Amino acid sequence: MMNMRKLAGGLLVVGALVAVLQVSAFGAVQIAWTDAGGNKVVQLQLVPIAVADPLYAGFDYAWFGTLDVEMATAPIDFVGTGNFIGQFNEPWFQVILYQDVHNLTDCTWSEFNLDLVGAFFGAVDGAVNNWSVNQTSFNILYYADPGPFVSPGGVFHDGITVFDPQSSPTASFVITKYPTCIPEPGGCAVLMGGLAGLITFIRRRKA
C-alpha cells in the first residue's frame, strides 16, 4: 500500500500544474463498471509524469485515477471510454489505475487475474499486498507469494498501466478482474467431515 502511495506521489510532480490540468477543457477518459455498490464511473485526470517515475514510458502525461471496488461477485468488467486528447492538444495514450478491491465474497483470495481487451498492459506495481506477479501484454496474474491472502472483509490493492495507441484518439478497452478463491477453514472442516463419512460408508459396504 505504501509503495502505491509513494508512486502516486511521484506521478503528481507539480501539484499546481495538476490543478491547472484538471480544470482545463481537455478530453476526458472514464472507467465505468458495476459492483456490489451499483453502477460506478470514475473520470480520469491528466497528470504529468517525470522521467524518473517508474511508470514513465515516453509519455509526459497520463490519464490517472483510483478505483474503489466492492467485489461481491466476479468477474467484473471495467470499461474505458472517452477521448485521449489532452495537454498541447495531443493524444496521451497511457492510463494508470490504482484499484482498491474490497473482498465482499465469502472466500479468501489467493490470486487475482486481470484480462485486457482492446489495449495492452504496461508496467505494474508488483509489490502490492506483498504478492508476486506474472504479466503478459493482455493478462496480469497476482499471486500470494509470500502473501498474505485477502480474507473476506480485506482489501486487494493493485496498480496497473494500460496503453491504448489506436489509429484514433478514442479510448476503448475492457479490463476484466476476478480472484481465485481458497476454501475457508470452516468449509475445509465440512469437506473433510464429508469425505470421512464417505470413506466409512464405503468400508461398511465392502465388509
Image: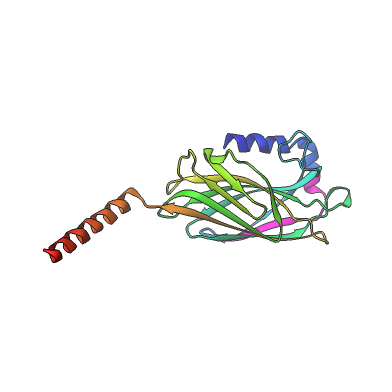
Please indicate whether residue 142 sits to the left or right of residue 150 in the image: right
Query: Could you tell me if residue 39 is visible in this image?
Result: no
- Res 193 → quadrant: bottom left
Please indicate whether residue 151 sits to the left or right of residue 7 in the image: left
Which span of residues is magenta-colored? 21-33
Work out which residue is located at the far right of the displayed protein and give it: 88
Residue displayed at 70% across by 61% down? 118
Display colour scheme: rainbow
Residue displayed at 83% across by 53% down? 91
Please indicate whether residue 198 sits to the left or right of residue 130 in the image: left
In depth, the one of 167 and 43 nearer the eye is 167
Work out which residue is located at the far bottom of the displayed protein and give it: 205
Measured as percent of width and height from the top left, residue 9 is found at: 69, 35
Residue displayed at 27% across by 51% down? 189
In this view, 166 is above or below 7: below
Measured as percent of width and height from the top left, residue 153 is found at: 44, 47
Residue displayed at 47% across by 57% down? 72
Measured as percent of width and height from the top left, residue 112 is found at: 53, 51
Query: Could you tell me if residue 160 is visible in this image?
Result: yes
Work out which residue is located at the far front of the displayed protein and give it: 206
If the image is split into quadrants, where does the C terminus sit? bottom left
- Res 18 → quadrant: top right
Q: Is residue 28 magenta?
A: yes
- Res 79 → quadrant: bottom right
In this view, 54 is above or below 134: above
Measured as percent of width and height from the top left, residue 144 is found at: 49, 43
If the image is split into quadrants, where does the N terminus sit? top right
